[in-house]
Image (cartoon, helix red, strand yellow):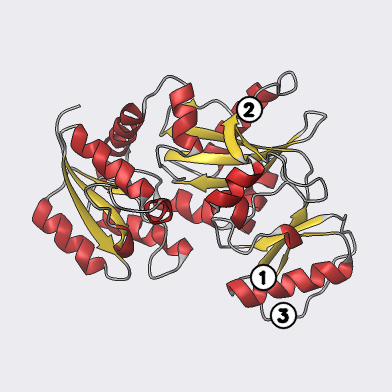
Amino acid sequence: MKKLRVLVTVHETLIPPESTEGYTEQEIDEWRTEFDIVSTLKRAGHHVQCVGIIDRLGDLRAAISDGKPDIVFNLLEEFDGIVSHDQHVVSYLELLRQPYTGCNPRGLMLSRDKVLSKQLLSFHRIPTPHFHLFPRQRKVQLPKKLRYPLFVKSATDDASLGIAQASVVADTASLIDRVGFIHEQTGSDALVEEYIEGREVYVGVYGNERLAVLPPWELNFGNLPADQATIATRKVKWDRKYQRRHGIATCRAESLPDGVTERLQHLAKRIYRALHLSGYARMDFRVRPDGSVFVLEANANPNLAATEDFAKSAIAAGLSYPQLVSRLIALGLGYQAAWRLA
């Protein structure tokens, strides 16, 4: 790949330093993805500039006007503290006719809206747990057909915000209490879905028109106590000491029932197209012991740190981390946005 001018968009507090030397593991975890991407781009010989953004699109416009980047490597996950507003930043890039990496605005909107995405998947007959939405600031009214246990989470937040062992409920009283907790603590609607007991498996996909599917990757819950639900709580996903204590790690999904790997990869591509995704994404599944598969959600622009599951599954597929980064840039440069077709 020829040497490019690359503008990396990050949250203003996550502009990475030149080196990790002198920082604690906890401090590095805050900007690990940003550091991995920026350092990889620099080693490849690209001219790299970072712009930190919180709530001012003018800063982005100025950086593009001054630096005239060939591509924006988009690592934003929110705008002004609102997760679903990252789509508007990408829409702004399209208005500027600026190529970028990652998902397009429509795909971001559909995948970030967990209720709408589940409705779309149901329309396409893609298996997903039965669900019910409990809107904030309304009286909790229980539907007649609820099958416990149930899983309660925010309808908009990601990164396991608000998810704990108490998120799995087995009776009406616990359900009402947890719905109230989500309303109060996250300020969002509560999404309640059937709890699927089984293995948690992730499948990465990248591409625009032509798609490539990565090997299934599994969240191994290690030696969690038998009385605890195997769910990706905040501690399971982000607490390094907790992970080491319980042997929690992600790894290639081995010994899946016959045909399940192929089904997961087939479904991952169907989901990608049903939600109009582009660039790259990760699909989260539950696989029951009998081999039945349920999609939990689709994650556009998942974590790209070199140590996270998307990159590790790419490495397992024979794609090194620098090659993965280059592939995502090529996909961004080649994406047929509306302004290219006008």
Residue count near mark 3 (Cα–Cα under 10 Å), binned few <14, some 14–19, many ≥20: few
Q: Which residue is mark 1?
A: 182
The tag earlier along the polypeptide, 2 or 3, is 3
The answer to whether mark 1 and mark 2 are in CB contact below 8 A is no
In this rendering, the answer to whether 305 lies above or below 25 is: above
Residue in the foreground of this view, choosing between 304 and 24:
24
Q: Is residue 342 visible?
A: no
The answer to whether mark 2 and mark 3 are in CB contact below 8 A is no
Q: Position of residue 273 (x, y in %)?
A: 52, 37
Residue in the foreground of this view, choosing between 211 and 219:
219
**Helix, strand or loop status at disc 3:** loop
Distance (Cα) linking label 2 and label 3? 41 Å
Distance (Cα) linking label 1 and label 2? 32 Å
Q: Amino acid at mark 3?
A: Arg
Q: Is residue 164 visible?
A: yes
Q: Which residue is mark 3?
A: 138
Q: Position of residue 15 (x, y in %)?
A: 27, 57
Query: 266 left or right of 139?
Result: left
Q: Which residue is mark 2?
A: 253
Query: 180 left or right of 215?
Result: right
Q: Amino acid at mark 2?
A: Ala
Q: Nearer the viewer, mark 1 or mark 2?
A: 2
Residue in the image at 83% along x and 68% along y = 174
Residue count near mark 1 (Cα–Cα under 10 Å), binned few <14, some 14–19, many ≥20: many
